[in-house]
Image (cartoon, rainbow, N blue to C red):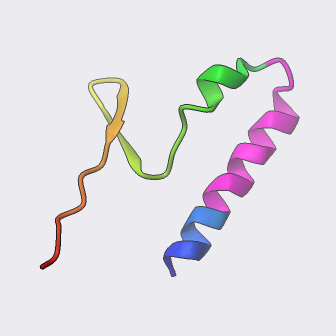
Amino acid sequence: MADKYAEGFWFAIDHVKVLFPDIDQEALAQADFMKKIEDVKLVPRFIPETE
């Protein structure tokens, strides 16, 4: 299930690259499905460790 979520995310990123070819690629590279938005910033999403 997680693989399909990640695949869909990267598919959407590819769409953005096509729709906005002049977008700052460095800024776009910061997009990551493992991050969340907090105070208008992308921050790591902490996943609880399992023992």
Task: Name the side, left or right, on which 28 lies relative to 11.
Answer: left
Task: Decide whether residue 13 is among the magenta residues.
Answer: yes
For image coordinates 30% across by 49% down, the residue present is: 45
Image height of 18 relative to 4, above or below: above
23 is higher (above) or lower (below) than 37: above
Magenta region: 8-22
Which image quadrant for residue 23? Answer: top right
Q: Residue at x 16, y 76 (%)?
A: 50
How many badges with numbers are in the image?
Answer: 0
Q: Position of residue 21 (x, y in %)?
A: 86, 25
- Residue name at image x 12 percent, y 79 percent: 51
Q: In which quarter of the image is residue 47?
A: bottom left
- Residue 19 magenta-highlighted: yes
Magenta segment main secondary structure: helix
Q: Where is residue 11 in the image (x, y as percent from the top left)?
A: 73, 56
Q: Vertical placement of 22 versus 49: above or below?
A: above
